[in-house]
Image (tube, helix red, strand yellow):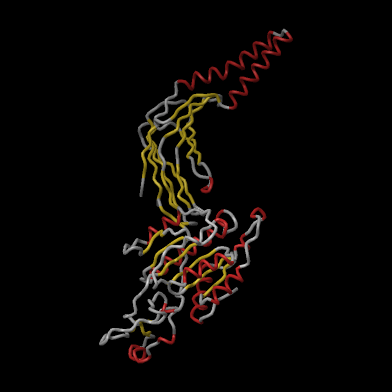
Amino acid sequence: MSGVRCYGTERHSRLLTARGWCLLAAGAVTALCAVVVNERDLLRAAAFVMMLPVLAGVVVAGTRIRLQVAREVLPSRTSVGADCQVQLTLRGTGRWSGRLLLEEMVPRALGGPRRAVVAQPQQAEMQLSYPLRPVQRAVHSLGPLIARATDPLGLAQYRRTFAGNERLVVRPAVLPLVGLPGGGEFGAGTVGGGPMAADPGQDAVVVRSYRQGDDLRRVHWRTTARRDELMVRVEEWAHRGEITVLLDHRGAAHRGAGPASSLEYAVSLAASVYVHLRQRSMRVRLATVDGAVLAGASGGADHPTETALDALAALCATDQRDLANLPLTAGTHDVVAILGALGPGTVEQLLLHQARTGRGHAILLDVAAWATDSDGKLAPNPGKAARLLIAAGWSVAVAGPQHSPPAVWSELCAGSQRGLGVQR
């Protein structure tokens, strides 16, 4: 729960409304015509019309809007498609005639400004609230609150802006995933391309319950028969390397706009993979193609999952066009890369980088399927990049907007266990 208390000390103004200005202009034109045609009755009518906005301004001149405003966003962190509530608590100490129009400034991505008409609150508090259902991740700013008081005819208004904003963090949607690429070997360290040797006298094999995605060749049948539960072998002495989830957020590598763009699909998929691996107690870091590490076990410091989701909420597309600034990884790193459009040059950069690390797994987005008429140049077909990666030993899945992230992840896991790339 969070709240901000706002006082009406920022800006205020008294001015005619559009209706007031129109009436004043109409009276002036009428007076001019009355002078030209020498019609006194028409001139009296014009004077009366012009006096109305002036009298309205006098009425509004006595207006004093003093409000204490407390705003709470519940919750202050949410995800795409989830509901949240904004609550405003008002306490009025000023004076005004008629009713008060309140306008809460809300970003267009959240539905635009919210308006309400209220009677003058005295010392008692007044509660106002409005719901939000964000459709796109971002860090949104709610506020300020604008209060307007008008005369009964709506010819003049007193306007006051109440300082104070509240932040709403909209995280990408995190979807449940099942399985791991390569089963139980995913993330296991390697030295010289093979498994690490056990120390003399050390028990090299332990068993645990079978998990979805484990290699069936690792089933320990003796323990399975004894416990009447499917058990698999785990070489605990093998060093567990760090896994890097690599997100391609190059603007030139994606197509589409808004919540339905390929970039938003990639961000949601990267968030889902990161959370899924963390839930499996793996050492994971989340990085972007510009070399930034958003969260994870980097430099010996781990970060909570909340850090990664907050970082993804604020992530914007980069102007970078190649993969020259990939984050540095150690030799035991496995990489799960969520990639946009790849040309031959960018594939070579990726392979050169991964040659110094562990196994590679890639989800290639068929970004041309997200393209609109305004996107201009079409993206390259992901088939060629997929073949190059598969030839280099990567497991690959190709995703389009019609494929759900859980289904794409399952295909990647199945393909890596077969030792083949998965191509749609």
Q: Residue at x 43, y 55 (%)?
A: 78
Furthest residue to the right?
A: 37
Q: Where is residue 309 in the image (x, y as percent from the top left)?
A: 42, 58
Quadrant in the picture for residue 226: bottom left
Q: Where is residue 325 in the image (x, y as percent from the top left)?
A: 47, 60
Quadrant in the picture for residue 376: bottom right
Furthest residue to the left?
A: 201
Q: In this view, does 199 lie to the left or right of 80?
A: left
Q: Position of residue 393 (x, y in %)?
A: 51, 77
Q: Nearer the viewer, residue 143 or 205?
A: 205
Q: In this view, does 242 lie to the left or right of 376?
A: left
Q: Nearer the viewer, residue 343 or 55?
A: 343
Q: Position of residue 221 (x, y in %)?
A: 38, 91
Q: Which residue is drawn at 54% across and 59% down?
A: 263
Residue 200 seen in the figure: yes
The quarter of the rendered structure image containing the C terminus is bottom right
Q: Is residue 195 above or below residue 98?
A: below
Q: Nearer the viewer, residue 158 or 335?
A: 335
Q: Is residue 286 above or below residue 234?
A: above
Q: In this view, does 157 lie to the left or right of 194?
A: right
Residue 91 seen in the figure: no
Q: How many marks?
A: 0
Q: Is residue 49 above or below residue 162?
A: above
Q: Is residue 252 left or right of residue 146?
A: right
